[in-house]
Amino acid sequence: MPPVRKERSDAVRNRELVLIAADRLFAERGDCEVSMDDIAAAAGVGKGTLFRRFGDRVGLIKAVVAQRTEALRADISTGPPPLGPGAPADERALALLDVLLRFKLDNRPLMLALENAGSGSPYLSETYGLWHAQLAGLLAEARGERDAAFLAHALLAAVRSDLIEHLTATGTPPADIRSGLATLARATLTPSP
């Protein structure tokens, strides 16, 4: 097996500059207002650097989301309860849904950009697969295997960015969205007879 090539320091620096610029522009302008040209200019790199490094706009958006969710993934895997291991499955599922909702509320333009990126089904993304597997496992543990995979999809639909955007645009306060999600999740977590 050939040795793993160490990434050049300028490539690492350029990647960080691009991610920082993209993150800032999505936060400032929203989904539809940010082009690859804008990001390249803000990062001080050539447009070709973006395409070589990330492939396309979708690849860049995925990289920004992956960077923002690193800490969240670690908290789910090894963090303290109730989000991390050690809490009952129903408490962990409620904590997971709440943290995902808060993440989407805090990152609305970026998450909307990811869901609207036109990269095919959102259900096939690595990030969605991660959240779905985690939630389905917790549902199976809390209420039994029956319907756990479907119910995980249904609960994750309640935190889709397009729904969050609609609710916030029509004046629903974030606290009400969180409360509604918790009510839905608690009802779903109740084992069926």
Image: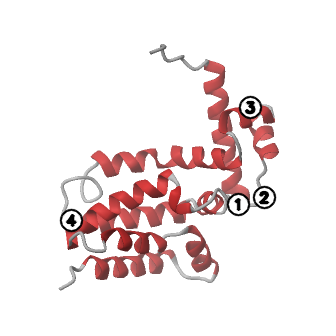
Q: Which residue in the structure is indicated by mark 1?
A: 30
Q: Which residue in the structure is indicated by mark 2?
A: 33
Residue 170 located left or right of residue 72: right
The image quadrant where one finds the N terminus is top left
Q: Which residue in the structure is indicated by mark 4?
A: 141
Q: Nearer the viewer, residue 107 or 156?
A: 156
Q: Are marks 1 and 2 in contact (CB under 8 Å)?
A: yes
Of callouts 2 and 3, which one flags the residue occurring earlier in the amino acid sequence? 2
Q: CA distance from mark 1 to mark 2?
A: 6 Å
Q: Nearer the viewer, residue 187 or 38?
A: 187
Outermost residue to the bottom: 193
Q: Amino acid at mark 3?
A: Thr
Q: Nearer the viewer, residue 9 or 4?
A: 4
Residue 115 located left or right of residue 141: right
Residue 164 located left or right of residue 29: left
Q: Position of residue 70 (x, y in %)?
A: 45, 44
Q: CA distance from mark 2 to mark 4?
A: 43 Å
Q: Which residue in the structure is indicated by mark 3?
A: 49
